[in-house]
């Protein structure tokens, strides 16, 4: 890794951590969502530097472009204003922070000592390689994933629109 | 690589392309006002400069001197950042669009062997995915502006925009996938091309005149792409996020001065980017529509030093101009859709149609790849023949059904 | 110079821990949800890093599937949030204490 790319790497990492920290400390959910978008975009940059351009663009399109827009949409739809919802009782805060520090240290240690170095700088993965693997070795998981999406879509329609259930019941009654 | 090459590829091209595109924006605004005036039998702005060409510049100067107001209960930082956020994705998407053919330039400033350099900021493997990913970020500017203004009309505009842009991204992505089937077939047949690069998509359409253009061979995808592009730009007939009569201006109600100008410009840049993508995918990009025609092709400019670079760029910009004219024409012709009609069109009409076309195109492409070796033909050519046959068959069926119906109808009815 | 794989793994650990903090500290169910997304993202980062370490495509494919599942999960989760809000007029996790609606 050259000095230049190391600097970019560190900058992206700082951006990701900063965004994540502000996400959990911001008072307004919209601000939290925006900081999380920053974290996601920084992560996409890291994917790019790790030689995974396809994952990087999917990260931007799915996480930043679809999931977070959905979050913003729900925040605006429910019109959730400012709410001081950060836990204010001391035991809870202390527990949270202690757990986090311990877990973080454990994970950092596991990562830093457990992972071996990459033997050589690999080339960028191409989209063709990913596509080839998805439609051969991973064909079954791919189909199951698409089924999961379909089930989720139908499930959401039923959960979020109780009137839909009533309409369907009324239709059934009318039919019988 | 010599210093001159690095300078050319890392500084000159990445600077010239956005500057050219941004310079075109006042031209589009002038065009919009003049064309809409013609459509309404008016003259339009014709006082400032020749034919009113400097009117947009006068408008910008006027906007610059207006007061920049921030509503008192607005979320200040988000409010101020939203116009910038709206601009960035569409400008960044320009990076992967090929504006011209590969030019050969000397490897040193005035001497050395000629080296091919694409007129494009970055010819990357994931070109079209980059455009789609940035397109999905474009929604943030509008949504944040709507929310941060702390105004219920703005908020409604922002929420509408979020739903609209997320919905229309899907059929647009599917339409693009159908085209990518053709261009990746081209990439597998010819070495040296990346499957998802926009340059590959352009090169796969090379042929006599416009015979290879995808707007014919992927006609359903082309129509879907056009509709979705208009919806992504939030322009009439899909301008619900800013619907004047209902929301007084929607997401940009509270904006004034330069920040309003940025939204205004952002819309035109977004239009230009989408037109450029559409041109590359469906209109053969920088390819000349006169290539291969017997008489005209003797006027070949490929050996004249500067013209051979400028001619493809000229064709590209001309095609983009025609796309912009289409945008303007649609805006001043069609009435705005109602909210439920918009959603129904997106989810019930466009999405299944796009899915259907991806299926048909994939089947035809696979069949073409299977029979191409037996006919010693190019798989892309076989695919086009198959599309033509399918379309002809459908046309005949419809024609005979109609003929049968009108024959069955009693005379005089 | 820094080793990209070990560095990314450490970063993934930090992001995961921050996600856990968010879940433990916040009461707004939407922010809790975002924290869960952050944890998923940290796991994805580790997958890509390990994939690079072993020169294998599988890491990236796992991330692809995890993103698909994340998208489905967010849709369902937000659907539940909207349904709960319609009942309780609140998105405070401490107030959502009935297993029915």
Image (cartoon, coloured by chain):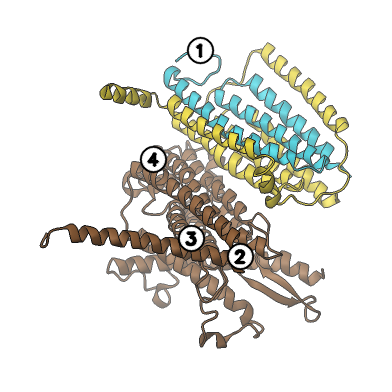
Q: Residues within 10 Å of mark 2 (few under 14, many from 20)?
A: few
Reading the image, the residue beneath label 4 is B153
Could you say which is closer to the camera, residue A150 or residue B412?
Answer: B412
Do discs 2 and 3 belong to a common subunit?
A: yes
The quadrant of the image that shows the N terminus of chain B is bottom right
Q: Colour of chain A?
A: yellow
First-in-chain label (3 vs 4): 4
Instruction: Tell me which chain the residue with mark 3 is part of.
Output: B
Position of residue A32 measured from the top left corner of the image (x, y, whole percent): 60, 32
Q: Which residue is mark 1?
A: C99
Q: Of discs 3 and 4, which sits in the foreground? A: 3
Chain C drawn colour: cyan
Separation of residues labelled 3 and 4 (CA atoms): 40 Å
Q: SS class of the residue under badge 2?
A: helix
Residue under pointer 3? B218
Crowd class of label 3 (few under 14; some 14 to 19; many from 20; radius 10 Å): many
* Residue drawn 59% across the image and 44% down it: A61
Residue C68 percent across, percent down from the top left: 60, 36
């Amino acid at each position: 890794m050259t000095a230049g790319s190391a600097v970019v790497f560190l900058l992206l990492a700082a951006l990701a951590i900063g965004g994540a920290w502000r996400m959990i400390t911001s008072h307004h959910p919209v601000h939290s969502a925006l900081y999380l978008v920053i974290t996601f975009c920084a992560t996409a940059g890291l994917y790019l530097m790790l030689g995974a351009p396809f994952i990087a663009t999917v990260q931007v399109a799915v996480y930043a472009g679809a999931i977070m827009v959905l979050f913003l949409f729900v925040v605006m739809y429910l019109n959730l204003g400012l709410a001081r919802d950060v836990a204010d009782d001391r035991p809870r805060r202390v527990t949270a922070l202690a757990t986090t520090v311990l877990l973080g240290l454990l994970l950092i240690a596991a990562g830093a000592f457990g992972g071996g170095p990459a033997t050589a700088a690999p080339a960028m993965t191409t989209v063709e390689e990913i596509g080839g693997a998805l439609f051969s070795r991973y064909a079954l998981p791919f189909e199951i994933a698409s089924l999961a999406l379909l089930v989720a879509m139908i499930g959401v329609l039923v959960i979020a629109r109780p009137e839909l259930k009533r309409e369907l019941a009324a239709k059934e009654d009318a039919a019988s | 690589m010599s210093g001159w090459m690095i300078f050319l590829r890392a500084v000159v091209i990445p600077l010239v392309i956005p500057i050219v595109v941004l310079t075109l924006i006042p031209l589009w605004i002038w065009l919009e006002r003049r064309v809409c005036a013609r459509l309404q039998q008016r003259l339009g702005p014709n006082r400032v400069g020749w034919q009113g060409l400097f009117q947009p510049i006068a408008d910008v100067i006027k906007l610059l001197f207006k007061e920049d107001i921030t509503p008192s209960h607005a979320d200040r930082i988000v409010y101020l950042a939203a116009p910038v956020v709206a601009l960035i994705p569409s400008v960044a998407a320009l990076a992967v669009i090929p504006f011209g053919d590969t030019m050969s330039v000397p490897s040193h400033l005035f001497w050395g062997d000629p080296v091919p350099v694409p007129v494009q900021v970055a010819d990357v493997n994931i070109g079209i995915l980059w455009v789609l990913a940035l397109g999905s970020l474009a929604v943030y500017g509008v949504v944040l502006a709507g929310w941060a203004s702390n105004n219920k009309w703005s908020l409604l505009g922002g929420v509408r925009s979020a739903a609209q842009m997320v919905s229309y991204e899907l059929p647009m992505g599917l339409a693009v996938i159908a085209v990518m089937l053709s261009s990746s077939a081209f990439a597998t047949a010819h070495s040296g091309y990346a499957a998802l690069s926009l340059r590959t998509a352009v090169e796969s359409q090379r042929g006599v005149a416009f015979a290879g253009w995808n707007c014919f061979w992927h006609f359903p995808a082309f129509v879907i792409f056009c509709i979705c592009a208009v919806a992504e730009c939030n322009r009439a007939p899909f301008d619900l996020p800013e619907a004047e009569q209902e929301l007084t201006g929607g997401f940009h109600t509270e904006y004034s001065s330069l920040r309003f100008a940025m939204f205004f410009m952002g819309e035109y840049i977004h239009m230009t980017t989408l037109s450029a993508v559409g041109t590359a995918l469906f209109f053969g990009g920088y390819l000349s529509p006169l290539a291969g025609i017997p008489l005209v092709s003797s006027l070949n400019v490929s050996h004249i030093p500067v013209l051979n670079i400028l001619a493809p760029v000229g064709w590209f910009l001309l095609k983009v101009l025609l796309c912009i004219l289409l945008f303007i024409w649609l805006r001043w012709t069609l009435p705005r859709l109602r909210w439920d009609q918009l959603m129904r069109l997106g989810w019930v009409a466009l999405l299944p149609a796009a899915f259907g076309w991806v299926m048909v195109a994939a089947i035809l492409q696979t069949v073409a790849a299977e029979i191409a070796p037996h006919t010693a033909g190019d798989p892309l050519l076989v695919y086009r023949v198959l599309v033509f046959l399918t379309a002809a068959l459908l046309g005949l069926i419809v024609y005979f059904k109609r003929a049968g119906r009108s024959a069955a109808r009693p005379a005089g009815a | 110079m820094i080793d990209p794989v070990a560095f990314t793994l450490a970063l993934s650990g930090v992001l995961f821990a921050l996600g856990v903090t968010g879940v433990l500290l916040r009461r707004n169910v939407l922010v809790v949800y975002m924290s869960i997304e952050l944890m998923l993202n940290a796991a994805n980062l580790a997958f890509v890093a390990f994939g690079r370490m072993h020169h294998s495509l599988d890491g990236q494919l796992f991330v692809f599937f995890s993103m698909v599942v994340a998208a489905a999960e967010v849709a369902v989760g937000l659907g539940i949030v909207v349904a709960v809000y319609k009942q309780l007029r609140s998105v405070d996790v401490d107030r959502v204490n009935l297993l029915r609606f």
